[in-house]
């Protein structure tokens, strides 16, 4: 179930260390990036080895509700003119 996933914010520099076979995204083109392109989010059910072994250090680890709130901030979403 989607709501049981863990969402992790990472620095864009760590993108090269992400094993996409261990996360819910398929490649670099399917990740959500911050507006300034300095961070991105991945989702998973089981902690990926690149995080558990310390190869990649998360900026934030969030649940579904928390990530939805974050995605609605100006750092992650642009205002759409009416």
Image (cartoon, grey):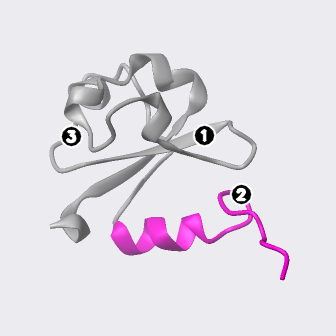
Residue 7: % across, % down: 36, 54
Q: Earlier in the sequence, mark 3 or mark 1?
A: 1
Residue 2 image-quadrant placement? bottom left
Q: CA distance from mark 1 to mark 2?
A: 10 Å
* Quadrant that contains the C terminus: bottom right
Residue 31: % across, % down: 46, 41
> Label for residue 47?
3
Residue 72 in magenta stretch? yes
> Label for residue 75?
2
Q: CA distance from mark 3 to mark 1?
A: 19 Å
Q: Nearer the viewer, residue 80 or 69?
A: 80
Span colored in magenta? 64-82
Residue 25: % across, % down: 33, 40
Residue for badge 1: 39
10 Å crowding of disc 3: few (<14), some (14-19), many (20+):
some
Q: Residue at x 32, y 34 (%)?
A: 26
Q: Earlier in the sequence, mark 1 or mark 2?
A: 1
Q: Nearer the viewer, residue 63 or 43?
A: 43
Q: Earlier in the sequence, mark 2 or mark 3?
A: 3
Query: Are the residues tagged 3 and 1 within 8 Å (C-beta)?
Result: no
Q: Secondary structure at mark 3?
A: loop
Q: CA distance from mark 2 to mark 3?
A: 25 Å
10 Å crowding of disc 1: few (<14), some (14-19), many (20+):
some
């Amino acid at each position: 179930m989607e709501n049981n996933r863990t969402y992790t914010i990472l620095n864009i520099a760590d993108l090269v260390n992400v094993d996409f076979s261990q996360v819910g995204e398929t490649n670099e083109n399917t990740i959500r990036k911050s507006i300034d392109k300095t961070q991105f989010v991945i989702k998973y059910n089981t902690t990926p080895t690149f995080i558990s072994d310390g190869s990649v250090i998360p900026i934030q680890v969030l649940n579904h509700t928390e990530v939805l709130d974050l995605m609605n901030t100006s750092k992650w979403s642009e205002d759409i003119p009416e």
